[in-house]
Amino acid sequence: GENVEQHPSTLSVQEGDSAVIKCTYSDSASNYFPWYKQELGKGPQLIIDIRSNVGEKKDQRIAVTLNKTAKHFSLHITETQPEDSAVYFCAASRYSSASKIIFGSGTRLSIRP
Amino acid sequence: GAVVSQHPSWVICKSGTSVKIECRSLDFQATTMFWYRQFPKQSLMLMATSNEGSKATYEQGVEKDKFLINHASLTLSTLTVTSAHPEDSSFYICSARRGGEETQYFGPGTRLLVL
């Protein structure tokens, strides 16, 4: 079945440095790739998404890249801040009325002051 | 906006009782709603998908008679955990999606503790 692998499982970076989280997906028909941030005790919050017709998307300090050939996509956070500490989930889906999102296993990001 | 609410945010109940969790899309109409459960330090596990006015589609291994889902309107879905047992204790999260769109918007979650 469809699978999304996410690495690393934990990541600690110095405040101000960049953080990169990588994911691979198995379903070549996937065409939508959202990233979610989940703070402790809260539901996931969409932070950025990318569709398969685009190779890169940026929103302020956050950027996502997609390599369809290799079935890889990555989240880049620059100039990290303490409030970036959370669990981040990548996901993949192929849109249809019956489609569901396949989540990665999550990355716990800690920002060291 | 795309705000999804859940009620209650947390609930404690005795073993054998039933618990109902509500999921509402506050500022949009959700043709599809999803229910997930999440154990500590784990990813989200999809339990079921519900379309307004239709029966829910359950994932493999999820008992439909134990986890009753009703999607009665375009803004409300409910999950009822029947005859809850301690192993049902978890964080239950719903999400909602507009018709014709891919993005799922998540609620804040409901923490269930069964004693």
Image (cartoon, coloured by chain):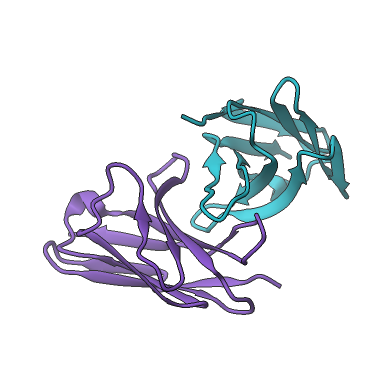
Residue A6 on image: x %, y %: 59, 29
Decide if residue A112 is on the left or right side of residue B57.
Answer: right
Identify the residue at horizontal 11%, vertical 64% (top origin).
B16
Q: Colour of chain A?
A: cyan
Looking at the colours in the rendered structure, which chain would you say is drawn in purple?
A: B
Q: Is residue A35 above or below residue B73?
A: above
* Residue A85 location, quadrant: top right
Residue A99 on image: x %, y %: 54, 49
Q: Is residue B98 above or below residue A112?
A: below
Identify the residue at horizontal 65%, vertical 56% (top origin).
B103
Figure label count: 0
Identify the residue at horizontal 43%, vertical 62% (top origin).
B50
* Residue A53 location, quadrant: top right
- Which residue sits furthest left? B16
Q: Is residue A47 above or below residue A53?
A: below
Q: Quadrant of the C terminus of chain A?
A: top right
In this view of the protein, which residue sits in the foreground, B109 or A108?
B109
Decide if residue A49 is on the left or right side of residue B15.
Answer: right
Identify the residue at horizontal 31%, vertical 42% (top origin).
B60
Residue A38 on image: x %, y %: 58, 50
Decide if residue A10 is on the left or right side of residue B35.
Answer: right
In this view of the protein, which residue sits in the foreground, A4 or B37?
A4
Residue B30 on image: x %, y %: 56, 71
Decide if residue B110 is on the left or right side of residue A102.
Answer: left
